[in-house]
Image (spheres, rainbow, N blue to C red):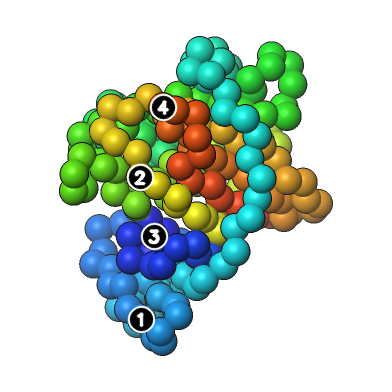
Amino acid sequence: MGLLARFAPEPMEVRLRQPPPLNVPLEVVAPDSDSLELLAGSTVLATASPAAVDIEVPPAPTWSQAEAASARYVGFTTNPFPGCFVCGPARTPGDGLRIFTGPVAPGESTLYAAPWQPDATLAGTRNSIRPEFMAAALDCPGYFTVAEPGRPMLLGSLALRIERTVAVGEPCVIAAWSLGGSGRKWRAATAIYGADGSCAARAIATWIALKPA
């Protein structure tokens, strides 16, 4: 998904068709002027196409609110993917984004937040964070707003709009909230706020719960 975010025009929607394999060469191709495909050999793993991302975002939580919310991150104790690049607590600083979102208000699940201060390993030109990592930061935070305890969910699609890049070391806040759903299909929204409190990027994710074994 991040690879497509790097090359696709904004805003866009990425749809996952197959779980991306590890340690396999991947290729981004443009089948037409409006869309992109991520390939492993001849297998289409994901597609990207233009999409409107008009979700309204709430006021940015403060840095201190985000820090307190992150301490309530349920993934510290129950996490189906502890090695996840975005939200895995098993990742060390510099090896993952380590974005740990928790409820802003203890005991409530309306708004989740986490602090994020991206490091130099994520930089592109002019000290700016590369779009693939901005897209990644918009991914997992929404999961914890819709996932039921003990039932993993996988990302089906992510519609995102990056309005501006953030800088290395910039104290950012990630926010996430549920957009509702039913059965196995749920939607969540996420946003990245820069140091000035303005929204730098926003996204709408569709999460699909795995069928019980």
Taking 169 as reference, is 204 left or right?
right
Instruction: Tell me if mark 1 has few (under 14), some (14-19) or many (20+) residues whose alpha carbon lies within 10 angstroms of its own.
Output: some
Residue of label 4: 195
Mark 1–mark 3 Cα distance, whole angstroms, equals 13 Å
Indicate the amino acid at tag 3.
Ala
User: Which of the 4 image quadrants contains residue 171?
Assistant: top left
The answer to whether the residues at label 2 and label 1 have Cβ atoms under 8 Å apart is no
Name the quarter where the N terminus is drawn.
Answer: bottom left
Mark 4–mark 3 Cα distance, whole angstroms, equals 23 Å
Mark 2–mark 1 Cα distance, whole angstroms, equals 24 Å
Instruction: Tell me if mark 3 has few (under 14), some (14-19) or many (20+) residues whose alpha carbon lies within 10 angstroms of its own.
Output: many
Indicate the amino acid at tag 2.
Thr
Indicate the amino acid at tag 1.
Ala
The answer to whether the residues at label 1 and label 3 have Cβ atoms under 8 Å apart is no
Measured from the top left, where is residue 201 in percent x and y? 48, 46
Q: Going 51% across and 39% down the picture, which residue do you hit?
A: 199
Indicate the amino acid at tag 4.
Ala
Query: Which dot, 1 or 4, sits closer to the camera?
Result: 4
Q: 59 and 103: which one is in front? A: 59
Mark 3–mark 2 Cα distance, whole angstroms, equals 13 Å
Q: Secondary structure at mark 3?
A: helix
- The vertical placement of 130 against 37, above or below, is above
**Disc with the residue nearer the chain's start (3 vs 2):** 3
Instruction: Tell me if mark 4 has few (under 14), some (14-19) or many (20+) residues whose alpha carbon lies within 10 angstroms of its own.
Output: some
Residue of label 2: 165
Which numbered circle lies on residue 5? 3
The answer to whether the residues at label 2 and label 4 have Cβ atoms under 8 Å apart is no
Residue furthest bottom as drawn: 32
**Disc with the residue nearer the chain's start (4 vs 3):** 3
Residue of label 1: 30
Mark 2–mark 4 Cα distance, whole angstroms, equals 12 Å
Q: Secondary structure at mark 2?
A: loop
